[in-house]
Image: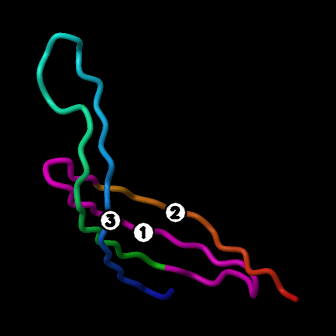
Amino acid sequence: MIPYLGAGLGLHFLTADVPPGTTGLSDDTKLGLHLLGGLRNQVMPNLGLFGEARFSLVDDTDQYKLMGGFTYYFVY
């Protein structure tokens, strides 16, 4: 198993439905910070599995995500 870490910046375009007759912003653009860490395992020469946790800091809308999947390497 191979551990990995990552980080990055993101530009988020936020939209919300605001009821008619009320005041407030319905569209906004925010800068966010993204952090992730995970494990990758090479199961076969051309197939890898991974699991990772992601955390996104975007003003007051923070998100936690647990993700998993596979990577298939095409061999020439």
Which secondary structure dominates the residues rendered in magenta?
strand
Q: Is residue 4 above or below residue 23?
A: below
Which type of secondary structure does the marked residue at label 2 adopt? Answer: strand
Are discs 1 and 2 less than 8 Å apart at CB? yes
Q: Residue at x 39, y 58 (%)?
A: 66
Q: Residue at x 53, y 72 (%)?
A: 50
* Circle 2 Cα neighbour tier, 10 Å, few/some/many (<14 / 14–19 / ≥20): few
Q: Is residue 52 left or right of residue 72?
A: left
Discs 2/3, front: 3
Residue tagged by mark 2?
A: 68
Q: CA distance from mark 3 to mark 1?
A: 18 Å
Going from N to C along the chain, the mark reached first, 1 or 2, is 1
Q: CA distance from mark 1 to mark 2?
A: 6 Å
Discs 3/1, front: 3
Q: Which mark is residue 10?
A: 3
* Range of residues picked out in magenta: 40-63
When asked about the image quadrant of residue 75, the answer is bottom right
Residue tagged by mark 1?
A: 52
Q: Is 68 in front, or is 25? A: 25
Which type of secondary structure does the marked residue at label 3 adopt? Answer: strand
